[in-house]
Image (tube, rainbow, N blue to C red):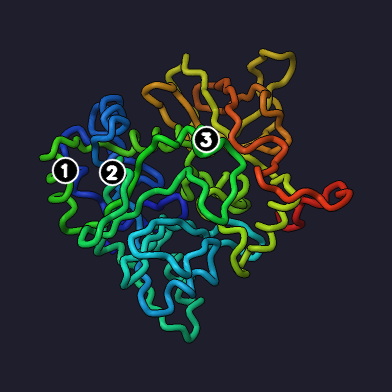
Amino acid sequence: MSADAVEQTAHGEAVRHTSPLLQRRGAVAGSGPDAGVAWHYGDPTAEQRALTRGGAVVDQSNLGVVRVAGPDRLSWLNSITSQEVAALPPRTSTELLVLSPQGHVEHAAAVVDDGEATWLVTETPVALAAWLNRMKFMLRVEIDDVTDDWAAIGEPVDAEGAEGEPVTWRDPWPTTAPGGTRYGPSDEEHPGADRAWRLVLVPRDRLVDEVRAREAAGWPLVGTWASEAVRVEALRPRAAREVDHRTIPHELDWLRTAVHLHKGCYRGQETVARVHNLGRPPRRIVLLHLDGSGHVLPEAGAEVHDVAGEPGSPEPGRVVGHVTSVARHHELGPVALAVVKRSVPVDAPLVVDSDGGAVSAAQEEVVPGEGVSVDRPAPRGPVSRGLGHHPSL
């Protein structure tokens, strides 16, 4: 671990590396889960436009990398995580979740196999590697946290890595994977349908050279302000932002890409199946369009309230959720992802706390208020009130 590991990420893991690209003129350092890389390089609006046009590179070297080798790696990962990966072909990207026995999200990882090892890109490399090592028993697997050796570069490219190219993970979001299901918009109508994104793993000591090669090809270096704004627009959940100790994947519409509903048993599967079959997850993710008339935006973690008094009143009422991600989008303006109680009406006006005073917010529905996926099995008989609520949720 490097000497600059003094800041903590959202999951409590130490920041292990400060990117050399932060030495660029105009670079402003990120914070929280994006500590160690640049938030922007002086012109965040232009940077975001370059990214949405499909020609930019993002320093994502703050992410962790875990490498799993050995002949049993895929069948073993299949047995302990939410995704079907037993027969994952080389250079085919997917993602998985590690769930608690109660079905709560503990770890999330981007997954790609190169034919010799499975690479997991995650925001909790230390904790994930430790958990995997505890679970390997007598199987032929080798788990290594290789974050000190490998760094990720983000690109707006919709392509898997080819044979002979660096290990590359193509984001499958929002296409509903085989065995998955969706709560939110159809794949074709989803706001993230046009978002191309992939992570390319490069040797950490070659990070600057790899970025310079892309700049030489005409791609500017942009910060996480840009990539996060595009992610929020795409309703794409991120473990370091949207997940807390109570999160189940249904609440974030994460059954689209990270959960296989018809595979064998794994930890947390009972809750996944119960909530899918009976509906009504306790909470739901929502996109908030924030009042941008003020100069101060709420921060991640800010309380979300319903509106007290008469309609149109800006006075906060009861707490109904929390903001998870905030972005200033170059076209949408100030927006946020929030996780709110499922019982909050989908058209209810909301108010978000901020240092500059309450900020009005309009909802854009993601997970429907009734909490039912598009393929929920039809009930076989009367369902008792409250039966859909797992006692641990």
Q: Is residue 27 left or right of residue 373?
A: left
Q: Which residue is mark 3?
A: 337
Look at the picture and state if 61 lies above or below 143: above
Residue 269: percent from left, percent from top: 64, 63
Q: Is residue 311 in sight in this rendering? A: yes
In the figure, 306 relative to 54: above or below? above
Q: Say which residue appears at 19% left-offset and 52% top-offset.
A: 207
Q: CA distance from mark 2 to mark 3?
A: 23 Å
The nearer-to-camera label among 2 and 3 is 2
Q: In which image quadrant can residue 133 be found? A: bottom left
CB within 8 Å, label 2 to label 1: yes
**1 or 3: mark nearer the eye:** 1
Circle 2 sits in a helix, a strand or a loop, which is it?
strand
Q: Is residue 111 left or right of residue 388?
A: left
The residue where tag 2 is placed is: 155
Which residue, given by chain and number where applicable, does mark 1 sit on? 214
Q: Report the front residue among 150 and 382.
A: 382
Residue 39 percent coordinates (x, y): 31, 37
Query: For this rendering, which residue is in front, 116 or 9?
Result: 116
Residue 3 appears in the figure: no
In the image, residue 124 above or below residue 216: below
Q: Give the CA separation, mark 2 to mark 1.
A: 10 Å
Residue 17 position, x and y percent, is: 27, 55
Question: Of the residues shown, which amino acid type is indicated by label 1?
Answer: Arg
**Could you tell me how far apart the alpha carbons at marks 1 and 3 are, in whole angstroms?**
31 Å
The residue shown at (38%, 74%) is 143
Residue found at the far left of this picture: 216
At a point 61% along the width and 58% down the height, the residue shown is: 261
